[in-house]
């Protein structure tokens, strides 16, 4: 008897509708561009931080104060690895570490002004690249795209994407 195959990701349901296939292809093409923008923004700082370290900084910027346990969970690494990454960021002046006022056994990590400038630069790079493309669309096209992306994002909110650490890039 042959061993059972276990699906390791989303299973594609065959669709016979050519219009639907065209829509899927359009989203994939747009996603390629957006991933390229993210990769380019990461390349801007690769001499300063590693990709996992940048993810930690973006988490601190978007989620507020963190502890090492939360960092380990999001990165999908052992807490000792998260501690080393955070120690390096603290040593480089990109993160600040302090005791939690409510629980002195816990350490709280926040962005330093230097870390905030680095994250702001990465995000500004992304916004500029996307703005350059959007500027080429007529206003009606931008409105339609905005509505379509908001609808897509709402539908995707219930989907389970692969863990970010398995994709080798982050969603910040």
Image (cartoon, rainbow, N blue to C red):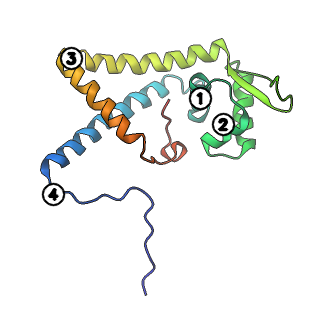
Regarding mark 4 in the picture, which secondary structure is present there?
loop
Tell me whether circle 1 and circle 2 mark residues in contact (CB < 8 Å). yes
Instruction: Tell me which numbered mark, 4 or 2, is placed earlier along the sequence.
Output: 4
Q: Which residue sits furthest bottom?
A: 1
Q: Which residue is mark 1?
A: 59
119 left or right of 33 in image:
right
Q: Which mark is residue 110?
A: none
Instruction: Tell me which numbered mark, 1 or 4, is placed earlier along the sequence.
Output: 4
Q: Which mark is residue 16?
A: 4
Q: Which residue sits furthest left?
A: 18
3D distance between C-alphas at marks 4 and 2: 43 Å
- Does residue 115 sit above or below 148 in this rendering? above
Graded by Cα atoms within 10 Å as few (under 14), some (14 to 19) or many (20 or more), the crowding at tag 4 reads few
Q: Which residue is mark 3?
A: 136
Residue pictured at 23% horizontal, 20% vertical: 142
Residue 141 at what x, y percent from top left?
A: 19, 22
Regarding mark 1 in the picture, which secondary structure is present there?
helix
Tell me whether circle 4 and circle 2 mark residues in contact (CB < 8 Å). no
Closer to us: 108 or 36: 108
Q: Quadrant of residue 8?
A: bottom left
Please name which of the two marks, 4 or 2, marks the residue nearer to the observer.
4
Closer to us: 41 or 48: 41
Regarding mark 2 in the picture, which secondary structure is present there?
helix
Regarding mark 3 in the picture, which secondary structure is present there?
loop
- Does residue 150 sit above or below 11 in this rendering? above
Graded by Cα atoms within 10 Å as few (under 14), some (14 to 19) or many (20 or more), the crowding at tag 3 reads few
Instruction: Tell me which numbered mark, 3 or 4, is placed earlier along the sequence.
Output: 4
């Amino acid at each position: 008897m042959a061993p059972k195959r276990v699906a390791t990701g989303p299973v594609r349901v065959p669709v016979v509708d050519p219009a639907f296939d065209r829509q899927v292809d359009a989203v994939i093409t747009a996603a390629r561009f957006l991933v390229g923008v993210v990769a380019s923004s990461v390349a801007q700082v690769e001499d300063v931080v590693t990709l996992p370290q940048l993810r930690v900084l973006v988490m601190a910027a978007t989620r507020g104060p963190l502890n090492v346990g939360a960092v380990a969970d999001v990165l999908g690494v052992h807490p000792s690895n998260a501690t080393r990454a955070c120690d390096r960021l603290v040593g480089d002046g990109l993160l600040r570490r302090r005791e939690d006022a409510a629980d002195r056994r816990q350490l709280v990590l926040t962005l330093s002004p230097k870390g905030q400038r680095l994250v702001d630069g990465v995000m500004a790079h992304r916004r500029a690249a996307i703005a350059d493309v959007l500027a080429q669309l007529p206003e009606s096209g931008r409105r339609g795209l905005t509505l379509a992306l908001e609808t897509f994002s709402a539908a995707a909110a219930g989907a389970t994407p692969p863990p970010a650490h398995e994709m080798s890039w982050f969603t910040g």
